Image (cartoon, rainbow, N blue to C red):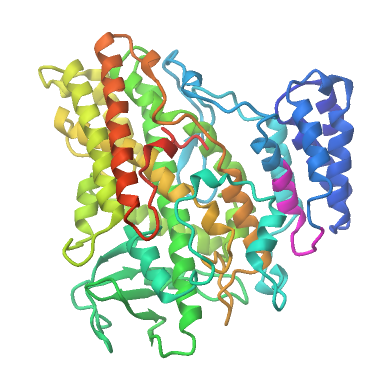
Amino acid sequence: KVKNQAMKISIKHATVAAGLVAAIANAHALNLRSVERVLSTLAEIATSPAAQANPYIPGILQLIAQISPIIPKDERNGEYTVALTAISFAKHSQSALALPTAQNVHVPGTILSPNFTPCGLTGISIPTTDEHLVTPDQYKIMALQYIQQALPVSTSAEESGAWGLGEDPESVVKAWTLDLKSEIKVLEKYPKKTRYSPKTFEHFVFHGFAQDKIERVRANDPYAKTRRGPATYAVYLDFMEGLQIRDGYVPYGGNAYFNHKGKLQSIVRGGEVFSKKSKEWETVVSYMRGSAFVWATAHDHLMEIHLSVANGLATATVEKLSPTHPIRRLITPFTYGSEAVNLNAHISLAGEFGSLPRMFSFTTQGLEDAFTASRAKLSGPFETIPERFAKQGIDGKHVELDYHIDGLEFYSAVENFVKSYVSLHYPNGDCAADAELSAWYERYDSVHPAQMPVLTCENLIKVLASSFHQASAGHNHFGNIYHISTDPCFAPTALVPDDICAPPSEAATTAMITGSTSLDMPKILEDYGHMFEDTESKDLWADFKQGLLQVGANIAARNEKREFPFRSFSPEIIETAVGV
C-alpha cells in the first residue's frame, strides 16, 4: 500500500522510505534475504513513471547500482542497520541531494505557535514544525517507526553477536556502513598501533574528545591518594555505574585519576582500584573511554546542545520575536534546521525502540534514568563558556587543554560580534525595556534546564555568545564523532566482560547513526548578510567572519606543534547550527 502511494507522488524520501517499509513488511523471517528485498524494491519504485519525474531519482538509481554489490552479507549486521544504511547512503550522495548553504537560511516570515511532542524518553518537549524546513517526510517517519517496531531491541549481549578471532572490527564496521563520513571533518584519529594504550587515553582526556570531562580532584575523595602519588585531576563517571543495563553487559562508569602532569595513575570501578599492574588494565581503560563517549553522546550532544540550547533558542525565537526584530535576525542562522533535526531525534533516536537503545546497553529504565541525571546536571545557574572552563580547575602550568585555548579564542570572536551587534541595536543599554526581548528571554529560560541570569544587555551578550558557541563549535566537537565510533574497540558504546570492544550489533548501529548525521550544513564562514536589514549589521557579520578566519589561522599554527591536530574550533569545518 505504501509502495503504491509512493509511486503516485514525488517527494524527496518516499522512494527510499516506502521501499524499506515494503521490504521489511514482506520479510516475515528476519534473515539476510531482507537485504535483497530492500534493494529490489528500491529498484522497482525508482523506475516507476511518477518516480521518473522526481529530480532525486537519477541519483538514487545510481546508488542502487553502487549499493547492490557492496553491502556485506553478515548475519551480525541486522536489518535495522541495513535499512539505515540505505537511507543514509542516499542522504550522502551529492547527486541525490543538494546540500544547503547560507542562502537556504531565509529571513524569518512570521511569529509561529508550534505544536509540541515529547522527544522520546528524554523528558523534554520539542516543536513538531520547523521555520526553515518542511514537515519531515511522513513516509520516512512511517518507515522508521515500522522498522523499529518490527525489529526488536536485543534483550541480552548474547543476541548482539561476537567478533571472530583475528577479525578487525573497525574494518568490518566500516564495510557494513559503507564508510559514509568524509575524512575532511576528522578531528583526531589515533594510529592503530597505539590507539588502545593508556598514553592515548591520556591524550583523549587532556587533548582530545573528553577534555570537558577532566576536573580537579574533589575534596575528601578517598581514591585521590593513589599508589603512584596523589592525584590532581580526575574524570568522574561513577554515577553511571548505577544505570540499569541489559543481561550479559558490564555497567558503564568509573573514575579515572591523573597526576599534575596528566599521567594516568588509576581507575576505580565499583569500588575496586585498577592500575597498570592489574591484569584487567587494558579492558578497564577501554571501559572508561566507552563510558565517556556514551555520556558525551547522550548528555552533551543530545540533551544539552540539541534539546536545551538549540531547542530553547529556536522555540523562543519563533514564538516571541517578530520577523524583523534584530535579535531574531541575529539568532536565525544559529538555529537553522534545529526543530527538524530534533524531531528526527524523537523519531529515530530517543524512543524506546529507537537507535540509542540499540547503540547502548541500557534498559529502557536505565536510559530514562540517564536522561534524568542529565537534566539534573544541566539545572542550576546558567554558566558561560569561560565560567565552564574555569570550573574545571586546570592550572595551566603543567597541563593546558587545547579545548580551552582554542575554545576561548573562538568564544572571544563570537562574544565580540554579539557585543557589537547588541550595542548597535541597544545603544542605551535598555534591553530589559524591550517587551518582545523580555518575553523571548523568559521563554528561553523556561525551555533550557539552567536558570538564566536577570535580563540586562551584558547578560544577554553572555547568554547569546555562549549559546552560539555551543550550537556551532560545541556541536562540531561532540557531534562530529564518526571517526571515533567506527572503531568499536576504542570507545565501545556497550561494554561486555573481558573485552575492549563493543559487540557487532551495537557497533554497527553506532557507526551508522554517527555517519548518517555527518551531512554538511551551512558553515559559519558563509555569508549571512541577507539576514540583516541595515548596512551596519551586515558589516558586523563581515567583520565577524574575518575574525573567525584569524582564529582558524591561529589554530592551524598551533596544530603544527601539536602531536595530533585539534580541530573542534577550526571555523572552516564548523557549521552554524545543529541542523543535522
Is 319 in the magenta?
no
Find residue 377 and report its horizontal and vertical position in percent.
33, 56
Residue at position x 53%, y 35% from top? 520
Residue 456 appears in the rendering? no
Find residue 539 and report its horizontal and vertical position in percent.
27, 16
In this rendering, the answer to whether 293 lies above or below 13 is below
Residue at position x 83%, y 21% from top? 52
Q: Nearer the viewer, residue 341 or 104?
A: 104
In this rendering, the answer to whether 299 lies above or below 292 is above
Picture quadrant where residue 531 is located:
top left
In this rendering, the answer to whether 538 lies above or below 184 is above
Residue 5 appears in the rendering? yes
Which residue is most to the left?
428
Find residue 426 and report its horizontal and vertical position in percent.
16, 18
Residue at position x 81%, y 27% from top? 6
- All told, the count of numbered labels is 0
Q: Nearer the viewer, residue 482 or 2?
A: 482
Is 75 in the magenta?
yes
Q: Nearer the viewer, residue 48 or 145?
A: 48
Q: For the N terminus, which image quadrant? A: top right
56 sits left or right of 310 in the view: right
* Highlighted magenta segment, given as a residue range: 73-86
Q: Nearer the viewer, residue 244 or 232?
A: 232
Which residue is most to the top?
534
Residue at position x 44%, y 73% from top? 241
